[in-house]
Image (cartoon, rainbow, N blue to C red):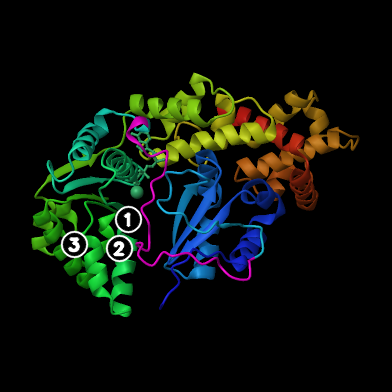
Amino acid sequence: MSKPELAQHDPDFSSALRTRVGPEGWKKWFTSVRHEVVEETLYLVAPSDFHIRWLRTNYQTTIDEVAAATFGPQTVIEYLITDRPDVTEEPSPAPDRLGDRAPEEAPATNRNQAPAHPPKFLSKYVFDTFVAGQSNQLALAAAKRVSEGPGQNYNPLFIYGGAGLGKTHLLHAIGHYTRTHLPTATVRYMTSENFFNEFVDGIRTRRMDSFKHRYRTIDVLLLDDIQFFEGKEQVLEEVFHTFNTLHELGHQMVLSCDRPPKDLGIADRLRSRFQWGLLADIGPPDLETRLAILRRNATDYASTPVPDEVLEFIARHVTDNIRELEGALTRVTACAALTDQKISVELARSELRGLIPDPATTPPSGPEILEVTAATYGHDLADLQGPSRVQPLATHRQIAMYLCRELTDLSLPKIGKVLGGRDHTTVMHGINKIKKLLTKDPELARQISHLSGILWKR
Ligand code: ADP
Ligand code: MG
């Protein structure tokens, strides 16, 4: 056996990740996450969709980097939900908790006959959770048609559209549906990257026959993100043959791509094949669809009710990527929960500031910051600018310094000037003190987030 076919885990990955995310982040978000490495895919198994989305929103880059450093740059990361019987087709060795030590040996299983990547469908990605809208109605209708009679309607079904618009969701939904209604059919979802990796492995291990056979016996092939094949002539040749065989056999193919075939840099004969069936595009969702998606997410995943005006605020501002739309909601609800605040438009605005380009909102000025800080804590403006160092006045003055630094482009000497003519070292000291306090004082974090919310809203 030239390569492991067992799921493996790696204590190095855990400890490197732990170092990167720090003890707090680790405790909160990673102790309940397990990992499993199957060939070049790293599966992260988390307890809920919510958890997965949190990891994606807040730790994706870190996870990517640690995975690439531990397992190699070609590593593909996939997320799964714990203990969902519909997630894996075959029993696989229990993946270890990220925090656990490695057992002496991975348990032996007989997976020799199994495909290297058993089909996996995320449980959330079904037709029921897919919100219909004008921008996706053709793709959705076609996906349903194909599920009801694979190989009989549009072959291939070619779904294209920008990132985060629901292509993968639809492919999984087709997988779920056909798996449920045609239990004997072989249904296989895979990313084009995985297809490519298997192809390369087939060549390397001189097992192209088994590679070819494996694909040609698939009744429904769901191939995601085929733009990945651009410029990879050899594998395109194989895609071409696979395509022809499956098509002749009347087996269904569903392809997804971030652009239409005409814009793909591939040989004409393959491009024209891709257009044999139906081309269905998914566009950016309109406001109504965005709102419907958020409502659904809010009811299904948020632990506390989210006021409608907050959903609307998010829907109005995050417009062209549903993944970001969902991420924005996760961020706001998680921030509210972690800092014990009410979910409000104010909070959403301050949490999503980086995400929302809003030319109408100009950053507050130094004097405005001073004014709001004074009013919030019940001081006179003159006291904040004055010499007294009594507490809590002195700390509130330092909060104003910190906010000036965070929210404006003012230099340290200029901030000093706003605060009644203090020199820049005093300002720097004040800012550093608040930064330090923030790492251990959630109440202070809440107050500062509240203040910056007010300041941005003006
Ligand atoms: P793509 O593959 O096009 O980049 P995904 O299928 O990964 O996008 O979708 C991104 C996220 O948005 C997923 O969580 C998916 O469930 C969600 N999503 C996309 N379109 C819809 C929709 N119409 N209704 C509900 N959720 C959607
Ligand atoms: Mg996708």
Element type at mark 2 = helix
Q: Is residue 90 visible?
A: yes
Mark 1, residue position = 190
Gap in angstroms between the C-alphas marked 3 and 1: 21 Å
Q: Position of residue 236 (x, y in %)?
A: 19, 66
Q: Is mark 2 within 8 Å of ligand 2?
A: no
> Tag 2 or tag 1, which sits nearer the N-term?
1
Local secondary structure at mark 1: strand
Q: Quadrant of ligand 1?
A: top left
- In the displayed structure image, the side of residue 373 where residue 329 appears, left or right: left
Residue denoted by label 2: 195
- Image height check: is 303 above or below 215? above
Instruction: Residue type at mark 2: give it.
Output: Phe
Front tag of 3 and 1: 1
Which residue reaches farthest top? 308
Q: Secondary structure at mark 3?
A: loop
Residue 128: name its quadrant. Answer: top left
Q: Badges 1 and 2: C-beta atoms under 8 Å apart?
A: yes
Q: Residue at x 69, y 49 (%)?
A: 27
Q: Position of residue 220 (x, y in %)?
A: 23, 50
Amino acid identity at mark 3:
Gly
Q: Can you say which quadrant of the picture contains the N terminus?
A: bottom left
Task: Give the residue number, with chain letter if any, for mark 3.
Answer: 265
In this picture, residue 38 sits left or right of residue 119: right
Q: Is residue 116 a member of the stretch shown in magenta?
A: yes
The residue that appears at 59% across and 25% down in the rendered structure is 304
Identify the main secondary structure in magenta.
loop
> The residue under label 1 is which amino acid type?
Met
Separation of marks 1 and 2 at Cα, in angstroms: 7 Å
Q: Bounds of the magenta span?
A: 102-128
